[in-house]
Amino acid sequence: MTTDSAISAAVDPGWEALARVAAGDAEAFAALVESHQERLLRLCERLLGDAEEARDAAQEVFLKAYRKAADVRPQGQVYTWLYRIAVNHCLNQLRRRSLVRFLRWNDPKERDAPTYDPPDGAAGPAAALEARRQWRATRRAIARLPENQRSVLVLVRFEGLSYKQVAEVLGITEGAVESRLFRAMRRIEAAQEAGDLRVSMGEAE
Amino acid sequence: MMTPGSEYDLMRLLHGELPADEARALRARIFREPELAEAYAKLEQTWQGLALPPASPVPPGFTGRIMAHVRSKTGPGSLSWSVAPGWVRAMAAAALVAGAALGIGVGRSWPAPAGSADQGSEPSSAFLASATAETSLADSYWSLVEDATVADGESEAQP
């Protein structure tokens, strides 16, 4: 282990665990999966827009992480490294989709898809309807963004990462993060103004 | 007055990315300048309007599913050496060479006395040798079967 990596390992003990994974320690790998699966599943679901597909994606992300564990150079946090693998995997997945599949939010079948109750069930059916309308509009907005803007938006808005962390995950500069985010916001604003993202009450039901 | 730079600053302010002093100064400007205030409100509305349902929970047994998937893709052998870092493999190889060298060295400096293998001074070795000579594996098997049959018959005979 180099001095740099030793310092990084001291910062995030996850790297030590990853070294044990590289040495074939199944327990260390199980612990790694346990501690990161929730956030990786969530990220994959945000990027892909499908829970089942997200599970498959997360599975592949951990497989890739396992295979790369021996060669990774410890730097920053383990989760940002895992996020990078996940984002790249999901973006590749999106590229593979056909255009129709890519814009699946417009699919009428989506109306039959299971929906979640809003956090405050006491708010009533009107609030639930409004929440679902908002979710649908957001999904549509995200799906229409170019992939580089989509990943930045999801990481900042829904994963709560700072510009610096996003830059680390995506391997770009903070300036690039800002620029992509700004353009994403502009697109969404424009779509909202044009009424593209509004879902009529009839459609939401 | 709005400039492209100030639009970026508004976004940084919204995301909590502006240093405290700059954020304070920009908030003061927003308070004074209606155009800036309107732009910020619009940006905030767009940002807050982005919402997704809570993510699906981790399915039960998901860790096991991942472990099984990794095992099926990498094979049991790859769990140890093939994915170990270079330094681990180097250490292992060095330990192997050192161990072999030590073994050879000890073997040469401490030769076994001639004919010791034939003498069979150990009682247990002698017993094993005689047992092997006198009874075959098949005999042992059938004697065990016989014993088991007798034992079953006895237990059935009991009321």
Image (tube, coloured by chain):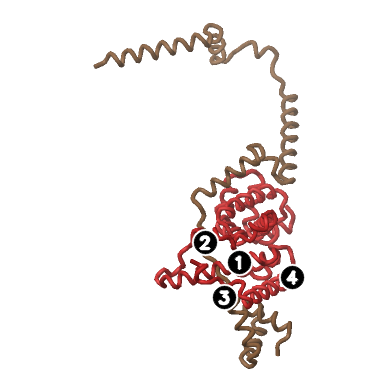
Chain colours: A red, B brown
Sequence-wise, the earlier of marks 4 and 1 is 1
Q: Are marks 4 and 1 on the same chain?
A: yes
The residue that mark 3 highlights is B48
Q: Are marks 4 and 3 on the same chain?
A: no
Q: CA distance from mark 4 to mark 2?
A: 36 Å
Considering every residue shown, the one lying at the far bottom of the view is B32
- Give, as a three-letter code, the residue at label 1: Arg
Other residues around mark 3 within 10 Å, as few (<14) / some (14–19) / many (≥20) = few
Q: CA distance from mark 3 to mark 2?
A: 24 Å
Considering every residue shown, the one lying at the far top of the view is B134
**Mark carried by residue A111:** 2
Q: Chain of mark 3?
A: B
Q: Are marks 3 and 2 on the same chain?
A: no
Query: Callout 3: helix, strand or loop?
Result: helix
The residue that mark 4 highlights is A176
* Residue B33 or residue A32, whichever sits in front: B33
Name the front one of labels 4 and 1. 1
Quadrant hosting residue A141: bottom right
User: As drawn, is A204 to the left or to the right of A84?
Assistant: left
Q: Residue at x 62, y 44 (%)?
A: B70
- Give, as a three-letter code, the residue at label 2: Arg
* Residue A73 or residue A169, whichever sits in front: A169
Q: CA distance from mark 4 to mark 3?
A: 22 Å
Q: Chain of mark 1?
A: A
